Structures are given as structure tokens and as C-alpha cells.
Image (spheres, helix red, strand yellow):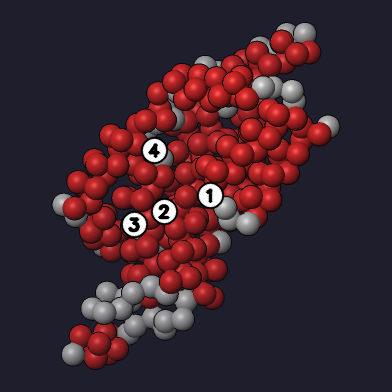
Amino acid sequence: MFVLLGVALVVIGFALRINPLLVVTVSGIVTALIGGIGPLDILNAFGTGFAGSRSVTTFAIILPVIGLIERYGLQAQASRLISGLKGLTTGRILALYMVVRQVTAAIGLTTIGGPAQTVRPLVYPMAKAAEERRLGLDVPNQALPEKTAEKIKAFSSSSDTVGLFFGEDVFVAVGSVLLITSFVDTNYGLSLEPLNIALWAIPVGIVAMLVHGSRLLMLDRTLKTMAGVVPATAATRAGGAL
């Protein structure tokens, strides 16, 4: 049971808001040492995992591309698009994105979205623009309160994370499903088929969609109570413009 101290370290590190990469690395090393694995074997495991996961280095390609398209106004264009659609609120935009993310992940398209390539340059600016339109903050020198903007950022990321996490297990060939089946077969001698896991993941994914989708739809009400800016009328907009 002492090897579970690594899990406790992760919980404590995240609660103290220490760098997640450092927390996970230290927790892994501590768990391995408690489990009787030597330093060289630990280093070998880290090296093998890094070399075997080529996706670790994809940030070297993604970040310059995101920076380039943002430089040429991707966020501004996304905000301008949403500002003309009256029916879309912040919560509805994020709920719609979560559904799309979960459905696409369920059919194996797990890499078409993500915090870096989708949430930051597209989803968050659109959600933020919807709230700015609701508050009438299209006047120069006015912006969302910091707490409101941070709340939208958090829910934008959560819509992507929840959609991916509960959607990818429906796809039988995803790595997490294959890891579960191989672990159960190796350690417990049970025959567990990937299709069974995928089928049981469907009702779990539906529940996750309903629960977090409801939270996203209720976000609009939360933002109304958080906003310290009174929605602008035509008169106040004219006055602000002057």
C-alpha cells in the first residue's frame, strides 16, 4: 500500500498548484523507488516512454503554427463571427463544442481538437465574444472583468477535456482501452475484450455529456451574477463612444 504515496503526492502537488510536470515526475520516481525499482531502471523507463511517445514533441510544430495564425487575426475573426450570432451564448457555444469533441473522439478522431490547437485560438475567443456581446462591451476601452474571463477560460478547457476523456474510450482501438485490457489480462488472468469496454463506455459518456453539458448551459447564469458591468443600452454605448 505504500506505493500509493505517489498518488497522494499528485493530489498534494495539484492542490498546492505546483508545476504539474514536476509533480507527476517526482511522484513517479517516488512510486518506483518504493516499489523496489532501481535508479537506472527508472531512468530507462522515462527514456523509453519519451522515445516511444512521439506526440510529446508535436508542440514544436503546433506552437509556431498557432502563433502565426493568431498574428494574422484568427482570434479577432472568431470573435467577429460570434458577435453577429445573437442566439449563441457562452454556455451554448461550449456545450456544442463539447458534444462535437466527444462524438469525434468516439470515432477515433482524438487529435482534431485540443487546448493548444482549438481551445485557445478558437473556442475561448468565441465564448468570450459571446459574453462581451451580452454585456454590450463593444465600446472601446471596455473589457470583461478578469474573474469572468478566467472563468470562461476554465470552462473552455473543461469542455475539451471532458469531451475527449469520455469520448475516446468508446473507440475500441484507442490506447487507453488497449492498456486496460492488457493490464487485466496480464495481472488478473481475465479475458477482457476491448469491445466490452467500449460498449460500457457509451452510457458513461452519455452521463458525462448530460452532467457537464448542464454545467456549461448554467454557466450563462453564473456569468450574469459574476459580471460587475451593467449591460449597455443604446444611450450608454453612445456616451461611451463619445
Rate crowding at label 2 as few (under 14), some (14 to 19) or many (20 or more) other CA atoms within 10 Å.
many
Which of the two residues, 110 or 58, is positioned nearer the viewer here? 58
Name the side, left or right, on which 125 lies relative to 176.
Answer: left
Name the side, left or right, on which 96 lies relative to 194.
Answer: left
The residue that label 1 is drawn on is: 19
The kind of secondary structure element at disc 1 is loop
Q: Which mark is residue 74?
A: none
Which badge, 1 or 3, is on the more N-terminal residue?
1
The residue that label 2 is drawn on is: 93
Q: Quadrant of the N terminus?
A: top right
Q: Please, what is the three-letter code of the amino acid marked with disc 3?
A: Met
Q: Nearer the viewer, mark 1 or mark 2?
A: 1
| Farthest residue, direction front | 39
- How far separated are the C-alphas under marks 1 and 3? 28 Å
Q: Which mark is residue 126?
A: 3
Give the residue drawn at x 43%, y 66%: 149
The kind of secondary structure element at disc 2 is helix
Which badge, 2 or 3, is on the more N-terminal residue?
2
Give the residue drawn at x 61%, y 29%: 202
Which badge, 1 or 4, is on the more N-terminal residue?
1
Residue 154 can be seen in this image = yes
Q: Please, what is the three-letter code of the amino acid marked with disc 4?
A: Gly
Which badge, 3 or 4, is on the more N-terminal residue?
4
- How far separated are the C-alphas under marks 1 and 4? 24 Å
The kind of secondary structure element at disc 3 is helix
Which badge, 1 or 2, is on the more N-terminal residue?
1
Classify residue 10 by image quadrant.
top right
**Residue 90 location (% of width, % of height):** 43, 60
